[in-house]
Amino acid sequence: MTTAEIRAVLEDVAYHDGDAAWKFHVGEDWTHGYPARPWLQVRFKAPCNVGGQPAAQHGRKWRLSPHMTRSEIVLTALKAVLTAVEHEARERFTYRGLPIFGPHVDVDALHTVVAEHEPAVRS
């Protein structure tokens, strides 16, 4: 499918979070000498988890293949929404006031914590 055909498929897809409708954005990455590579990203407005003010939010980019079927494109859009919702939940879920499962924790910091602590297991 071309990028235009992918966009046409996504015109029939919707996700609403309360009153806010999320948008499905399709962009392209260009590499010298190679065809454009399309990707999908969910975009929505939500309160910033730091300042609390409404702000534009963008999910991660999901690469799409020109060989994808309509069903694969729609399922990728669903996966993009589910992943973005999980991201928001990880930011808002706290233990003792801190988002310990937050998506923005540095992997090297996590490695240090795991290396320095025994696993919590039942006796």
Image: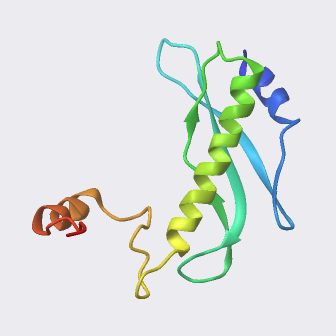
- Which quarter of the rendered picture does the N terminus lie within? top right
Can you tell which quarter of the image residue 53 is in?
Answer: bottom right
* Spot occupied by residue 85 in the image (x, y as percentages of width and height): 63, 58
Up the image or down, 80 lies above or below 93; here it is above
Q: Residue at x 75, y 24 (%)?
A: 71
* Spot occupied by residue 34 in the image (x, y as percentages of width and height): 51, 13
- Which quarter of the rendered picture does the C terminus lie within? bottom left
95 or 120: which is nearer to us? 120
Q: Residue at x 51, y 74 (%)?
A: 93
Residue 26 visible within the image: no
Up the image or down, 33 lies above or below 10; here it is above
55 or 81: which is nearer to us? 81
Please give left or right for residue 45 compared with residue 85 in the image: right
* Spot occupied by residue 115 in the image (x, y as percentages of width and height): 12, 61
Up the image or down, 28 lies above or below 105; here it is above
Q: Residue furthest bottom?
A: 96
34 or 102: which is nearer to us? 102
Please give left or right for residue 41 compared with residue 96 in the image: right
Please give left or right for residue 40 compared with residue 32 in the image: right
Residue 22 visible within the image: yes
Q: Residue at x 44, y 61 (%)?
A: 103
Q: Residue at x 20, y 59 (%)?
A: 111
State how the image is colored: rainbow
Q: Residue furthest left?
A: 116
Can you tell which quarter of the image residue 106 is in?
Answer: bottom left
Say how many tags the image has. Answer: 0
Please give left or right for residue 89 compared with residue 31 in the image: right
